[in-house]
Image (cartoon, helix red, strand yellow):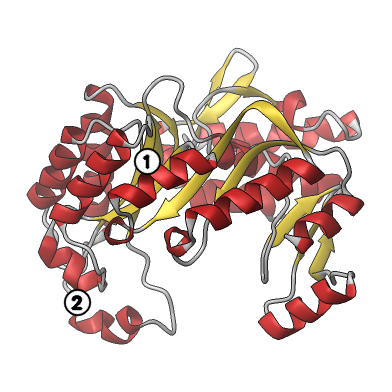
């Protein structure tokens, strides 16, 4: 809470559109603790008329009484890390919940008054077939929740999966493309609008918090190791818990990994991130604060991507093509690096 007060001194009168309790397992937080955090934010900042207050949760960590208490505390959106609707896959992923837990948790959230519930799913899991992924999607649509984000499995270095990678039956690129396209088709037929590369929502339930990232408009991170992006600067709080607590007690929070993002670098980020939102945009809308003399160079870069089939142009607006969605990393790299 003291972090909130100290941060508000550097960024007074900021309007808060979204609060996101994320990282680790926030649903282990008691509802009264979440309520106190929100009250502290309200005292030090200004909430917008209808802020989105999200809590990340694992399905096995939310009880009926806890769901009701979270809702009363002011949380109005829950993002569940379901990951799969196959118990075998959940076990491989090391998850502590079961498919039954996912359905039960969504049920108690609805009963507690949560209208806005999101599910995270993964595809390309070890040994997962296209039909099994299709079954996951069918089970998801039975939940009647408002939002879903799905991602392909990434094998990161220094993880158990990375050490086991040669023994895992992982999906090849062709299968992953088929899984992605199947997911898009099924969800759109089920009434979910594909508004971002990995995200789908019922009308009016797009993630406000994630759009803040994609539109590169700025955010404040609270807590040890939390990153912020404000006033053109990206920086973090100390990752060392003891050091972070010491700084809070002294009333002076350090900035770590700080970098100023300005000029062409900021425009590059703006465009690369804005392309994730699958809605055509005008180039001038992502570079209003910068020298318009650069517009020609960036338009040439976008046109080059268009001729390669990665982008579409609608009149004077750009967005990813179907091919560009599949090769977003290539598009982003082309925008970010000279």
Q: Secondary structure at mark 1?
A: strand
Residue 234 appears at what percent x and percent y? 78, 58
Give the residue drawn at x 56%, y 21%: 313
How far apart are labels 1 and 2 at the CA level?
Answer: 29 Å
Give the residue drawn at x 69%, y 42%: 216
Q: Which residue is mark 1?
A: 118
Q: Which residue is mark 2?
A: 168
Q: Within the image, what quadrant is residue 168 found in? A: bottom left
Give the residue drawn at x 36%, y 32%: 113
- In the displayed structure, would residue 279 be above or below residue 29? above
Left or right of 104? Residue 294 is right
Residue 88 appears at what percent x and percent y? 11, 66
Residue 2, numbered label: none
Residue 324 appears at what percent x and percent y? 45, 39
Left or right of 126? Residue 110 is right
Q: Tell me the quadrant of the picture where the N terminus can be found.
A: bottom right
Give the residue drawn at x 16%, y 49%: 133
Q: Within the image, what quadrant is residue 57 found in? A: bottom left
Tell me which numbered mark, 1 or 2, is placed earlier along the sequence.
Answer: 1
Q: Secondary structure at mark 2?
A: loop
Foreground of the two, 93 or 13: 13
Left or right of 229? Residue 179 is left
Question: Which of the two marks, 1 or 2, is nearer to us in this view?
Answer: 1
């Amino acid at each position: 809470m003291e972090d909130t007060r100290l941060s508000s001194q550097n960024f007074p009168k900021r309007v808060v559109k979204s609060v996101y309790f994320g990282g680790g397992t926030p649903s282990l937080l008691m509802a009264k603790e979440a309520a106190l955090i929100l009250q502290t934010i309200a005292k030090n900042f200004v909430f917008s008329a209808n802020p989105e207050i999200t809590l990340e949760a694992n399905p096995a960590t939310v009880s009926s009484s806890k769901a009701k208490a979270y809702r009363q505390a002011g949380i109005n959106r829950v993002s569940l890390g379901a990951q799969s609707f196959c118990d075998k896959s959940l076990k491989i992923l090391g998850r502590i919940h079961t498919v039954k837990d996912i359905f039960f948790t969504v049920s108690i959230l609805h009963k507690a008054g949560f209208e806005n519930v999101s599910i995270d799913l993964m595809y390309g899991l070890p040994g997962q077939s296209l039909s099994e992924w299709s079954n996951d999607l069918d089970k998801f649509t039975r939940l009647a929740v408002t939002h879903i984000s799905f991602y392909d499995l990434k094998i990161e270095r220094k993880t158990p999966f990375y050490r086991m990678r040669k023994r895992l039956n992982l999906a090849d690129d062709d299968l992953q493309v088929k899984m992605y396209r199947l997911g898009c088709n099924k969800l759109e037929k089920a009434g979910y609008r594909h508004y971002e590369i990995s995200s789908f929502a019922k009308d009016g339930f797009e993630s406000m918090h994630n759009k803040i990232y994609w539109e590169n408009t700025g955010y404040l991170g609270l807590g040890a190791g939390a990153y912020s992006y404000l006033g053109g600067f990206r920086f973090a709080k100390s990752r060392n818990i003891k050091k972070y607590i010491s700084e809070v007690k002294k009333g002076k929070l350090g900035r770590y990994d700080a970098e100023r993002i300005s000029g062409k670098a900021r425009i590059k980020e703006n465009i690369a991130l804005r392309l994730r939102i699958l809605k055509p945009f005008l180039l001038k809308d992502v570079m209003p604060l910068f020298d318009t003399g650069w517009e020609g160079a960036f338009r040439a870069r976008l046109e080059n991507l268009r001729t390669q089939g990665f982008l579409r142009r609608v009149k004077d607006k750009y967005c990813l093509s179907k091919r560009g969605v599949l090769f977003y990393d290539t598009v982003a790299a082309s925008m970010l690096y000279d």
